[in-house]
Image (cartoon, helix red, strand yellow):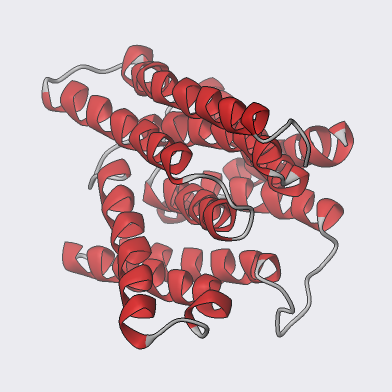
Amino acid sequence: MILDSALFPAAVTMLIGVAAYYKTRKYPSWRNIIWGAAILGGFLGGYALLYRDLSFPPRTVLSWLPWLVLVGGTVVAMADRHRYQWWRYGARGLIAGASAFVLLWPILRQESMPAAFLAWLTVAMLWSVLWFALTPDNRDQKPAGTTLFVGAVGLALVAPLSGSILLAQFGSALAVVLVVALVFSFLMRGSRWDSPSADVGVLILGTLLVDLRFYAGASMVVMVWLLVSLAAGAGVASILQHRGHSGHWTVLAPGLISSLPMAVAGWMALQTYLASGGGY
């Protein structure tokens, strides 16, 4: 479990990050995808070991995860290179809406049209708004990476209490690849996280959170606190950057603040688990 959820994803992330960094020295215009590729490769390596399903067309909701991230990450990375910012906004909203529809389809088709539309719209809007808040324009996205790391840790803690060991392993794999990418980006002088790096993390974590709520049955109060954790990290990062702060504190502070609501989410999940008798 440790090998599949942590060691192998960490090793893949490190190898891809180092190789891509030196390879792109000849092509500096492509450096904005270095850490996004490392995060994606590391997580998909762990996914392949944990779930062992890369079928197409996907057979289950979780089978959609790699395809949504690959297609969505490619689309938003291409939009990020466009000179008009509204391309980025449009691409993020489109991918969030399409991903929410695909993931929720087994549930939506059993509901009435108004109920299905409301459920899809709620998830798509929350996903889009958090995405926009976490990845502001033209900035180093390491603060978003720190916040996403805390969100992944929260998922890894909450998921087993909600009945899904598999989602907990996915959360662990995502947390590991994010922290490895963050550490190595600090060690490589002048290396920054551009938007595609954080976009990949948002896509993976968003997909796992949708699965946690609608298929693992996590309570609404737990989900609210997890979303508050992400929003708190985004808010702190925005305040610090608007006030001109820079350096490691600007990267670490959003994660420290977002860990407080995340701890509340874990506590609420534990209380729900104990109240249910402590059994899966």
Q: Is residue 55 visible?
A: yes
Counting the numbered discs, the total is 0
> Residue drawn at (74%, 35%), measured in percent from left and top?
10
Name the residue at 54% across, 60% down. Answer: 214
Give residue 230's position: percent from left, percent from top.
Answer: 37, 36
Pick whichever, 105 or 137, lies toward us. 105
213 is higher (above) or lower (below) than 81:
above
Q: Quadrant of residue 135?
A: top left
Residue 181, percent from left and from top: 58, 34
Quarter placement of the C terminus: top right
Residue lying at 34% horizontally and 65% vertically, measured from the top left: 124
At x 51% / y 57%, what residue is drawn? 210
Q: Identify the image quadrant of residue 14.
A: top right
Whole-percent x, y for residue 161 in the image: 67, 35
Which residue is at the far left? Answer: 243
Quarter of the image for the N terminus: give it.
top right
Question: Which residue is situated farthest in the top direction here?
Answer: 249
From the viewer's side, name the closer residue of 141 and 205.
205
- Residue 25 visible somewhere in the drawing: no
Q: Nearer the viewer, residue 82 or 215?
A: 215
Q: Looking at the image, is 14 positioned above or below residue 201?
A: above
Q: Position of residue 99 (x, y in %)?
A: 47, 70
